[in-house]
Amino acid sequence: MPKATNADDSDAPDGVQIDLISGERMDGMATMEKIRMILDGVHDGNIVILEEGLTPDEESRLIEVTMAEISPDEFNGIEIETYPKSDTRDSSLLGRIMGGGDESAAKLTVIGPANQIETLHKDETLISALVSRD
């Protein structure tokens, strides 16, 4: 059977690769291991979807590292969207003091190259994005 090729006849597949990463895979990783895995995928032009998202501290660190790696000709940065945490648990001050204010990861995080992904709509149940190939 003939091999499908791109218009430019390169060996790269035609389309965008999406890496779906389970929470189980991320559980045993240190923050910098997670960040490196995410950024390595995004540097390759992939869209990375994290099942359980990142903690606020991990997300802040991801943004810091990304900013340090931005280069005009090679890497434009990332676009990141996260489903918000559920409001069903007790978010009052007393609830947080008593253990209800868990800083656990968000539900789902979508990360991709800033020049390839554009968020069209986001709410607590939907992230709609337009993904293009360079």
Image (cartoon, grey):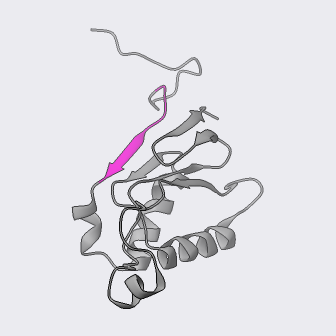
Q: In the picture, residue 25 is in which quadrant? A: bottom left
What residue do we see at 41% from left, 63% from top? Answer: 106
Image location (x, y in percent) of residue 8: 59, 22
What residue do we see at 60% from left, 33% from top? Answer: 130
Q: In the picture, residue 115 is in which quadrant? A: top right
Q: Quadrant of the N terminus?
A: top left
Q: Point out the residue furthest to the bottom here.
A: 97
Q: In the picture, residue 64 is in which quadrant? A: bottom right
Image location (x, y in percent) of residue 56: 50, 74
Q: Point out the residue furthest to the top here.
A: 1
What residue do we see at 40% from left, 54% from top? Answer: 108
The residue lying toward the viewer, choosing from 133 and 80, is 80
**Vertical comparison of 122 with 51: above or below:** above
The residue lying toward the viewer, choosing from 72 and 113, is 113
Q: Is residue 37 magenta?
A: no
Q: Quadrant of the C terminus?
A: top right
Horizontally, is 59 left or right of 94 in the view? right
Q: How many marks?
A: 0
The residue lying toward the viewer, choosing from 58 and 134, is 58
Horizontally, is 3 left or right of 65 in the view? left
Horizontally, is 23 left or right of 47 in the view? left
Image location (x, y in percent) of residue 32: 44, 78
The residue range painted magenta reads 14-21
**Vertical comparison of 64 with 125: above or below:** below
**Vertical comparison of 36 with 116: above or below:** below
**Vertical comparison of 57 with 113: above or below:** below
The residue lying toward the viewer, choosing from 13 and 37, is 37
Q: Point out the residue furthest to the left here.
A: 24
Image location (x, y in percent) of residue 113: 60, 49
What residue do we see at 47% from left, 85% from top? Answer: 93
